[in-house]
Amino acid sequence: MIIDSLENIEFYRSVNNDFYQGLLFIKNSSPDIELGEYPLTATAKALVMEYETNYQNTFGYEAHRNLIDIQYCIKGTERIPWSHLSRLTPYTEYDLVKDVTFYKWTEKQGEVIIGDGVFSIFYPTDAHAPVFCTDEPTLIRKIVIKVSI
């Protein structure tokens, strides 16, 4: 997992072009960007979504096998607990179409607050539990860059 600032985008130019293009998309997006899917490269796309954060999530952790998530709140902030897969127990079978498995809630290994210039990159072993509010429940607009691996 990576937690970093949008100020460091140029570093990712030499790390991975999909990461770099995704972070540029985030940096250049307005908080009023339309919801939906935006193709970025042959192996990366941006999903713009909006939802209400809460004090808890009802589905536990999620993890992907074939995707890396870069997550950033373009409007508002979100607290995302995370844990390494080795600490978790799945409660769903792997969904090949959606590339996701859901895991039972257990004590977090750590957490990140995204937004206000801070993004996070979740690799396939980084189970994450989005939807948590930072102070009080609020409507957020979030960009998730999906990078195929």
Image (cartoon, rainbow, N blue to C red):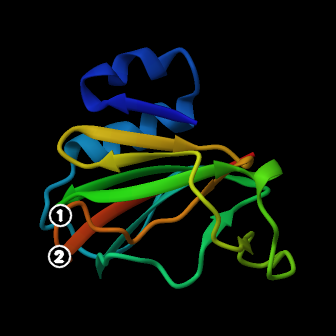
Please tell me which residue lies in front, 62 or 57.
57
Alpha-carbon neighbours of circle 2 within 10 Å: few (<14), some, or many (≥20)?
some
Which residue appears farthest toward the front when viewing the image? 107
Screen quadrant of the N terminus: top right
Q: Is residue 131 above or below residue 5?
A: below
Residue 61 vertical placement versus 112 (above, below)? below
Residue at 22% over, 56% down: 74
Q: Is residue 147 visible?
A: no
Q: Amino acid at mark 1?
A: Asp
Question: Which residue is at the front of the view, 8 or 63?
Answer: 63
Residue 138 to residue 82: above or below: below
Whole-percent x and y of residue 114?
Answer: 31, 49
* Residue beneath disc 2: 138
Residue 88 in sight here? yes
- Tag 1 secondary structure: loop
Question: Which circle, 1 or 2, is nearer the viewer?
Answer: 1
The residue that appears at 42% across and 15% down in the rendered structure is 11
